[in-house]
Image: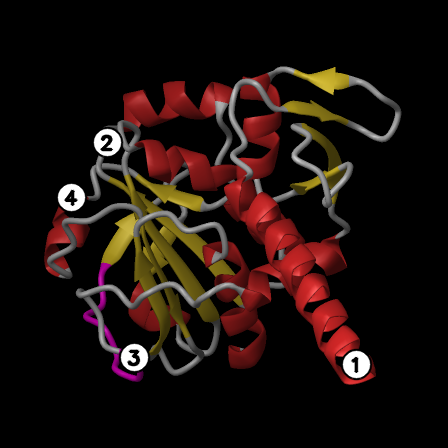
Amino acid sequence: MKRYLLLLIVALSLTVIVKAQTVVKKRRLDEKTVVKDTSGTVFAYPVWQAMVKSGDYVVKPIDPSSDSTAYVIYKLSEEQKDKRLSRMKKPAESEFFTTGEKIASFRANDLDGFKIKLKELEGKVVVLNFWFIGCPPCRREIPELNKLALSYANDPNVVFIAIALDNKSDIKEFIKNTPFAYHIVDDGRMYANLYKIHLFPTNVVLDKEGKVRFHASGYTLNTPYWIKKTIEESK
């Protein structure tokens, strides 16, 4: 009898756990979800969605055991953010480059007249970004790429180059409101064609020998994390 009662208690406990997990799995965050910060300020749907999409914030249910639609939004520390990004799947390699191989060199001038000769940058880590103004995912990643580039502003051995397909006047107008902390090369379609790039954005990291160590196309939340990780491993 005691054994039967014990088994019954275990079975009921498992049922409760399964039901609780089912409730959590059925949660759907949408316009009806109430999201507030720790002070109680409620955020509109577009606002908290943008905050979460930035990768700087997470939302957690106020009561995980209930079917309540109330959530609290938390800002992640840099350490928490890196830990979260490190657990995500590494961005898929692009189809335009091969890890471990050198790429064809090119010469160009950036918007400020700075002369760029890729061959002469060997000995430095080079970060390349291929983009264009009318590309939403390209624009979306610029704020995080800026943080990354500015974090190496005092390191002459890391060079950031953004190759844009647009003309100089359009880019200059664009960066008035959306600064881009890379060396920006305008009219860069010939350079994109050199590597047969047709998906944007495409990010590449070259090590000090000029060999490809990271490359990915399209927007993913953890691309800047992997660029930084590759830079540090290549220094």
Secondary structure, mark 3, is: loop
Q: Quadrant of residue 137?
A: top left
Q: Position of residue 115 (x, y in %)?
A: 36, 52
Q: Which mark is residue 166?
A: 2
Residue 141 falls within the magenta-colored stretch: no
Label annotation for residue 1: 1
Q: What secondary structure is marked by label 2?
A: loop
Amino acid at pointer 2: Asp
Residue 38's disc number: none
In the displayed structure, 224 sits above or below 7; it is above
Mark 1–mark 2 CB contact (< 8 Å): no
Quadrant housing the C terminus: bottom right
Q: Residue at x 40, y 76 (%)?
A: 122
Is residue 69 in sight in this rendering? yes
Tell me the distance, in whole angstroms, between the alpha carbons under discs 1 and 3.
66 Å
Q: CA distance from mark 1 to mark 2?
A: 80 Å
Amino acid tagged 4: Arg
Please provide the residue range marked out in magenta. Answer: 99-106
- Residue 63: image quadrant is top right
Query: Which comes before the other along the chain, label 2 or label 4?
Result: 2
Taking the view exactly as shown, the residue that stands out farthest to the front is 1
